[in-house]
């Protein structure tokens, strides 16, 4: 009887384990998942607040006209902050004081470096200074990049015809200059646009004139003009009319 009782108890325990095995597996899986989650939270908290990952260096990339050391100084309030807690709003406010910055991007590099990649404003041409003395080198948005007493070399003069920088005529002239290929842009001495539909270029040398018209089809106009110039005498007083690029006129 005792032997039979022991067998019965072993059988009951075996059946109990068999019926509860799925529940035990679920419990183990839940405990493992909870452990992993807790570990991840601890890693994130450690990374965010640990002084081991605090900003020690601010690297500035992409500057040529802007003094990188001045940018580093402006962002010095980020030093000592954990990389995960860098104040990007403050960075935006600090960099807003640099008018030559067109855009920027940041990157955190473990363990201690904050990288700031800057895109500077690029000049499109020069204009007579509003003060009446000298010339301002400006970008397509009309932001002054530099000032000089004499006209800067290598950039077309944008004739505002009495209008302000940032006017519709200025925007049209700048738009045309931006679409010109480098070889053709190098030949342009000046550009004027009393209205957005009356862009006119003057080439260097003998002063050949280009009637451009509006900014519509500017890419096609640039190709047509380049081919026309290649077929004409560069020392002749000519006018190229590409305002209708499908039917250009040379006179």
Image: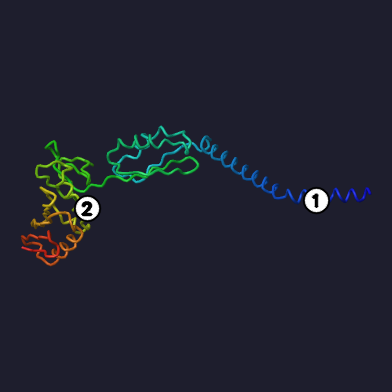
Residue at the farthest top position: 77
The residue furthest front is: 1
- Residue wearing tag 2: 178
**Local crowd size for mark 1, using a 10 Å CA cut-off: few (<14), some (14–19), many (≥20):** few
Distance from Cα at disc 1 to Cα at disc 2: 83 Å
Number of on-image labels: 2
Q: 5 or 113: nearer the eye?
A: 5
Pointer 1: what residue?
14
Residue sitting at 92 percent across and 50 percent down? 3
Residue 79 in the image: state x and y as whole percent. 44, 34
Q: Relative to 118, is 52 on the left or the right? A: right
SS state under label 2: helix
The residue under the point 54% across, 40% down is 44
Contact (CB < 8 A) between labels 1 and 2? no
Residue in the picture at 66% in, 47% down:
26
Residue 242 percent across, percent down from the top left: 12, 60
Q: Colour mode?
A: rainbow
Q: Give whichever of discs 1 and 2 has the lower sequence position.
A: 1
């Amino acid at each position: 009887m005792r032997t039979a009782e022991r067998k019965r108890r072993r059988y009951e325990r075996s059946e109990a384990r068999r019926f509860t095995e799925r529940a035990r597996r679920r419990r183990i899986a839940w405990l493992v998942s909870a452990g992993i989650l807790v570990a991840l939270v601890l890693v994130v908290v450690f990374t965010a607040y640990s002084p081991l990952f605090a900003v020690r260096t601010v690297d500035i990339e992409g500057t040529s006209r802007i003094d990188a050391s001045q940018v580093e100084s402006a962002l010095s309030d980020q030093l000592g902050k954990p990389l995960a807690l860098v104040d990007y709003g403050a960075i935006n406010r600090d960099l807003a004081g640099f008018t030559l910055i067109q855009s920027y991007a940041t990157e955190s590099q473990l363990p201690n470096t904050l990288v700031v990649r800057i895109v500077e404003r690029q000049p499109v041409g020069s204009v007579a200074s509003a003060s009446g003395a000298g010339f301002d080198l400006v970008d397509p948005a009309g932001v002054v990049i530099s000032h000089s007493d004499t006209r800067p070399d290598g950039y077309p003069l944008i004739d505002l015809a009495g209008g302000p920088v940032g006017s519709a005529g200025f925007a049209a002239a700048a738009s045309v200059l931006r679409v010109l290929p480098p070889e053709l842009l190098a030949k342009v001495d000046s550009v004027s646009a009393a209205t957005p539909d009356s862009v006119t270029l003057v080439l260097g040398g003998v002063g050949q004139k280009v009637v451009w018209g509006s900014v519509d089809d500017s890419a096609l106009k640039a190709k047509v003009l380049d081919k026309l110039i290649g077929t004409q005498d560069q020392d002749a007083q000519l006018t190229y009319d590409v305002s209708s690029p499908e039917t250009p006129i040379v006179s």
